[in-house]
Amino acid sequence: MAAYDPIGDLPTHSVSNQPPPLEDYDLYTSDPGLRAAVAREGAGWAEGEIAALGRACGRAETIAAGFAANRHPPELKAFDRFGRRIDEVEFHPTYHQLMRMGLEAGVHSIAWTEARPGAHVAHAALEYLLTQVEAGVCCPITMTYAAIPALRHAPELLAAWAPKITARAYDPRLVPMQEKGSATVGMAMTEKQGGSDVRANTTAARPTAEGAAELTGHKWFCSAPMSDAFLTLAQGEGGLSCYFVPRITPEGRRNRIFIQRLKDKLGDRSNASAEIEYEHAWAVPVGEPGRGVATIMEMVRHTRLDAAVVCAGMMRQAAVQAVHHAAHRSAFGRPLIDQPAMKAVLADLVVEAEAALVLVMRVARAFDGETEAERAFARLGGAVAKFWVTKRLPNQVYEALECLGGAGYVEESMMPRLYRQAPLNAIWEGSGNVNALDVLRALGREPDSLAALLAEAEAARGADARLDRALDALRPAFAAPGEGGARRLVEAMALALQGSLLVRHGTPAVAEAFLAARLPGTMRGCYGALPEGLALDPVIARAQVA
Ligand SMILES: Cc1cc2nc3c(=O)[nH]c(=O)nc-3n(C[C@H](O)[C@H](O)[C@H](O)COP(=O)(O)OP(=O)(O)OC[C@H]3O[C@@H](n4cnc5c(N)ncnc54)[C@H](O)[C@@H]3O)c2cc1C
């Protein structure tokens, strides 16, 4: 938080040419692309709540809380003072503050508690805002949101837990569920020998007499280990199956889930990610035996949506930070924002952010599943968006960071946090290649999904010759693509979709810049290498918030 009336008139120099802190601004009303998407994709009914979170996220104290939660990372308390295992994680109070803010805003629940069109769009808008101020808390909030579809495979569990999972409240205590007003849920799939290849999981599930199971094994990555329960893959009698493993058993005993250590991560530092062990841990099956991957994929599909959404949010935040700095910083006698080479970079950042936003919000609407075609589009569109938007974020942040010069490289600015966070979402829930290969497989298995995606892209045919050429090039690319061409194909699909959406719904200057600089054949190697003659000022203005 900016200090009160800092003294800039110092004995050796006066402090000048420094931007004002970017705080106490409204993340929602200052984002024209988001406002339009919320209305267009059917979440206008939630605008009041979305706007409230936008204001809360922009407050100086919220931004400061995000910094503090990362400066004071979580600590494992494996033992109590008497040497007994407790396996708890202590977080800085600001982490709890931000978790409370997100959960009370319903980021995790609005998609399920509001059974009406636009519910997933409302969810995506909230998540997009929250991640801009603190990305670490989005991990447990996303997993909690995404647990519901998997739990539908276990109706009794769903009935018992859904009211707590969807409660707009935060209760971080590790106590029996009946004493809690709310619950969070994590997921444990990844093991040492393979994270992508989950079928190689060795964690064993032994059925017990009461229809439950005991799990024994090691999970190499398990984020938010203070969650109240974990959806877990383990080898049961019918093969790899999905289980629900609560931290406290129904008898009120601490379940035998042991946290070995917390990961020392590149970024995402406010959030705990752990190595855990199940040692005869009590669990209850979810879904059919042997169908563990299919069951947990219900969760993964939703976490993938959020992975793309949070990356779109971070892209926006990176662009906003860069534009803010350039608007208030001069070099060689002129504000940076007025200098042509900088304008090209700033406009490029805004174009990328808006292309990501328009894609993820359209896909979020498809997650509402209003028609069979929408459900088909969600399946493929979600994977395409996850691949592409997560891939584009790291470079976006790096270029935005450079716009701040040295000021972007110091920890007091937002940029290092964004930079360290940026690669994460491409790794988890299907790393780039795995995600692209999933798309490839879906093309063969789900012709409806491909038809739905093509229909969405083709909706803009005729609007622009460059886009038509990209659409023409897409169809032959689907003919028997090999694994080596998976990324090329998914990239082409994402760009065609983004182009189509921007032409139909984007502001004209953004759409034109995208067509001129992002379609296959026009895309260049670095930001700011835009063709001459584009209207850049109206593009940049979309990220100028103060
Ligand atoms: C911060 C963080 C939090 C995480 N939280 C969780 C969590 O809560 N729960 C959980 O279960 N996991 C979690 N993970 C683990 C994450 O999901 C895995 O790291 C991810 O699935 C990749 O698995 P892996 O690390 O074993 O890599 P590998 O599976 O070994 O893959 C390595 C590389 O090979 C590529 N690859 C794999 N197969 C192929 C192929 N057939 N062809 C071409 N390339 C291929 C992958 O794309 C990847 O780039 C987390 C990871 C991180 C970094």
Image (tube, grey):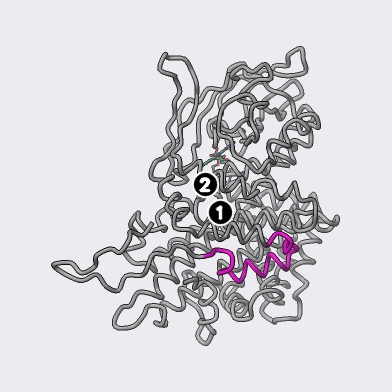
- Disc 1 marks a residue whose amino acid type is Leu
Camera-side mark, 2 or 1:
2
Residue 466's label in the rendered image is none
Q: Residues within 10 Å of mark 1 (few under 14, many from 20)?
A: many
Image location (x, y in percent) of residue 357: 62, 64
Image location (x, y in percent) of residue 391: 55, 57
Element assignment for label 2: helix
For residue 401, above or below residue 383: below
Label pair 2/1, CB-CB below 8 angstroms = yes
- Disc 2 marks a residue whose amino acid type is Leu
For residue 93, above or below residue 289: below
Residue 130's label in the rendered image is 1
Residue identifier under label 2: 98
Element assignment for label 1: helix
Q: Is residue 374 left or right of residue 496?
A: right
State whether residue 485 appears in this view: no
Furthest residue toward front:
4
The answer to if 353 sits in the magenta stretch is no
Q: Distance from label 2 to label 1 (Cα)?
A: 9 Å
Q: Residue at x 72, y 40 (%)?
A: 148
Identify the magenta region: 26-47
Image location (x, y in percent) of residue 96: 51, 41
Q: Earlier in the sequence, mark 2 or mark 1?
A: 2
Furthest residue toward bottom:
533
Q: Quadrant of ligand 1?
A: top right
Q: Residue at x 51, y 82 (%)?
A: 537
Task: Please identify the quarter of the rendering in which residue 326 is found.
Answer: bottom left
Q: Quadrant of the N terminus?
A: bottom left
Q: Nearer the viewer, residue 91 or 449?
A: 91
Q: Nearer the viewer, residue 528 or 209?
A: 209
The answer to if 45 sits in the magenta stretch is yes
State whether residue 314 appears in this view: yes
